[in-house]
Amino acid sequence: MAGRLVIVGAGQAGFALAAKLRALRDVRPITMIGSEEVIPYQRPPLSKKYLLGEMDFDRLTFRPESWFAENDIEIRLSTYVEEIDRKTKRLRMQDGSTLDYQTLALTTGAAPRTLPASIGGDLDGVYTVRSKRDADRLAGEMRPGRRLLIIGGGYIGLEAAAVARHLGLEVTLIEMADRILQRVASKETADVMRAIHHERGVVIREKTGLHRLIGENGKVCVAELSDGSRIDVDFVIVGIGVSANDQLAQDCGLDVGNGIIVDEFARSSDPSIFAMGDCAMLPWKGMRIRLESVQNAVDQAEAAALVMAGSDTPYEAKPWFWSDQYDVKLQIAGFNLGYDETLLRPGAREGSVSIWYFRNRQLIAVDAVNDAKAYVTGKKLLETGREPNRAVLADPAADLKQLLI
């Protein structure tokens, strides 16, 4: 029997790794360590259905608590690792206890960036949205008529705006860059999503940053913006991106750079230590990228499980993402890094549209807004490496099925 596997991090990737190993009939001892007080759960619904009260927490958990004991997986909650000793293969926990491993998996995820205290980031009423605790604290603020400021026009900020407007709050969203979604999507996609939010009453102010937050009795009440204006607020959601939780890896001497650097088998610079999910920097098409998605966390973890069980098959990421806002589903296939051309294609249904990304005339990604056919077609083209017929793609009346013939 193989020696103990310790999984540091009890999120999507950590759970997927443990579950896949047990599905493969791997009987090695497994210990999973999680800093939260609850068993592993899905994060995406936290800022949507859970916050709206449409989904109980029990429906978010991957498996009931009994599943872990039934599958001989020890799970330690409300604790964390302070140090990795690679020479002795020993972990030191925050309470001073130690835990030995033969194989170590770092599935530590990412943490939301926060505002510095010097500009009011430590005031009550300033939130991020990443964990169950975050969502539970935020739920008490989400009441009709209250004034919410969202800082950051990425997917987290836009999803929070959609939930808040659905619940009847007054929402202002500020984005320091020239436009929303600047880092992750094209101007065309941003224009579509901006219009959707404007129609539903969200005030979006682009090219506008935060100067500082002002509090009264320790609670945020006013935001001073970079253009000199001031707005009254009841609470604030900060959605300015995340950073990989790679400090533990860095401290023990692993190769790190915007995440824990791994090879195509999810191995770090130490062959007995793997990393996967949001904390991992993986090779992809001659580059190194970090994919912040549920799909990658699951796929990379399951591929790593196969390697741990004896396979030598490398992981080939096939990125896809999604974002739900109001009754709008944005589905993304591929990775638009370095695109130099886009093509906008109206969909068959009213309000549906797709944006196709190219680099050096080659298709690299598709954004589909309420257009499942465009998403599925684009995903198949990307997976097979086929290039779409531009004439068909540019003709809204043409059937996308022609691209797959």
Image: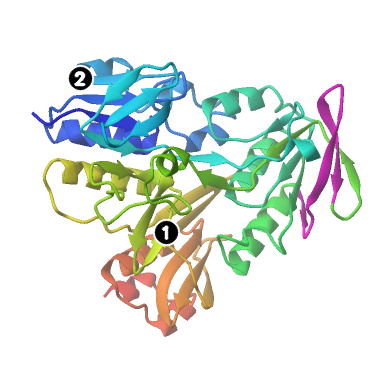
Q: Residues within 10 Å of mark 2 (few under 14, many from 20)?
A: some
Disc 2 marks a residue whose amino acid type is Asp
Provide the major secondary structure of the magenta segment: strand
All told, the count of numbered labels is 2
SS class of the residue under badge 2?
A: loop
Residue 348 visible: yes
Q: Is residue 109 left or right of 29 when viewed as pictured?
A: right
Which of the two labelled residues, at mark 1 and mark 2, occupies the earlier sequence position? 2
Q: Position of residue 97 (x, y in %)?
A: 36, 16
Amino acid residing under circle 1: Ile
Q: Position of residue 224 (x, y in %)?
A: 87, 44
- The residue at which mark 1 appears reads as 289
Question: Dot 2 corresponds to which residue?
Answer: 72
Residue range in magenta is 203-225
Classify 70 as above or below 26.
above
Task: Report if residue 209 lies within the magenta region.
Answer: yes
Q: Quadrant of the C terminus?
A: bottom left
Closer to the camera, 79 or 236? 79
The residue drawn where x is 40% and y is 30% is: 83
Percent position of residue 260, x then y: 40, 48
